[in-house]
Image (spheres, coloured by chain):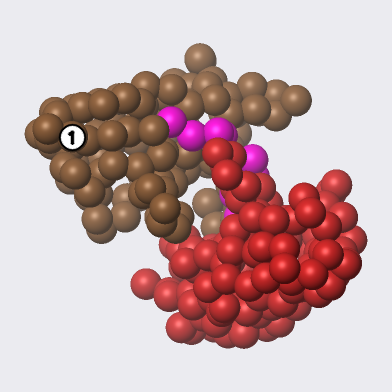
Chain colours: A red, B brown
Amino acid sequence: DIVLTQSPDSLAVSLGGTATINCKSSQSVLHSSNNKNSLAWYQQKPGQGPKLLISWASTRESGVPDRFSGSGSGTDFSLTISSLQAEDVAVYYCQQYYNSWTFGQGTKVEIK
Amino acid sequence: QVQLVESGGGVVRPGRSLRLSCAASGFNFRSYAMHWVRQAPGKGLEWVAVISYDGNNKYYADSVKGRFTISRDNSKNTLFLQINSLTLEDTAVYYCATSGGNYFNCFDPWGQGTLVTVSS
């Protein structure tokens, strides 16, 4: 199975600041056929199901604020939240869908 | 709007069985692959099972193979998860989600989940 390791496990950022979450895969999730990475990012708030933010490593979903951005390729990926808002407090997960489906352990984002 | 609503959770004794349901609306359910994902209290997300759009293909996580059965009724836009021989480790919120017309895609949307608590 592909193992995804997120870092850090938690971080506290000031309102208006920038949060960066990393996700490292145990093997590449890049499709050589179309040069797309099978890597997604989700936001989960307490008592709710996860919400898809980013697909294919960097494609922001419709309705997701542009302060959320995804980057990376192969085995190393990042989610960046710019201009952090109070409503961004949540746990964030990366997921690979290249070979079966696995998730990172999650990163908790709080306000400093 | 697109919606998934899970039900069927509750408190059950170890060794018993439970069937979870997921009612879909707002999209062409019969054309989409469907998944179950679970989350133990305070823990991360674990993919559990997937079923093809027509129900002919099913795959399971090794941790649940042989005890869990995923199925669907396209005439009722409903997904099911039969859980047998429940253990304490099955305690979790169970979510249904869709990956669209392709197994190997990300999940959108998800339901709000149904809590299964296994306790003696």
Q: Quadrant of the N terminus of chain A?
A: bottom left
Tell me the kind of residue under disc 1: Ser
Check residue B109 for magenta coloring.
Answer: yes
Place of residue A73 in the rendered image (x, y in percent of width and height, measured from the top left): 68, 83
Vertical comparison of A66 with B4: above or below: below
Residue B87 in which image quadrant: top left
Q: Any magenta on residue B9?
A: no
- Secondary structure mostly seen in magenta is loop
Is residue A31 visible in the rendered image? The answer is no
Determine the image quadrant of residue A48.
top right
Give neighbour class at mark 1: few <14, some 14-19, many 20+ (Cα, 10 Å). few
Q: Secondary structure at mark 1?
A: loop
Q: Is residue A15 visible?
A: yes
- Residue farthest toward the top in the current orientation of the protein: B76
Circle 1 marks a residue in which chain?
Answer: B
- Residue at image coords 47%, 39%: B95
Q: Which residues are magenta?
A: B106-114
**Where A48 falls versus A73 (above or below)?**
above
Q: Position of residue A60 (x, y in %)?
A: 81, 60
Percent position of residue B82, x then y: 28, 30
Towards the viewer: B50 or B86: B86
Image point (72%, 63%), residue name:
A111
Q: Residue at x 50, y 68 (%)?
A: A104
Which residue is disc 1 drawn over? B119
| Residue beneath the point at 67% across and 70% down | A12
Would you place residue A24 above or below residue B3 in this image? Answer: below
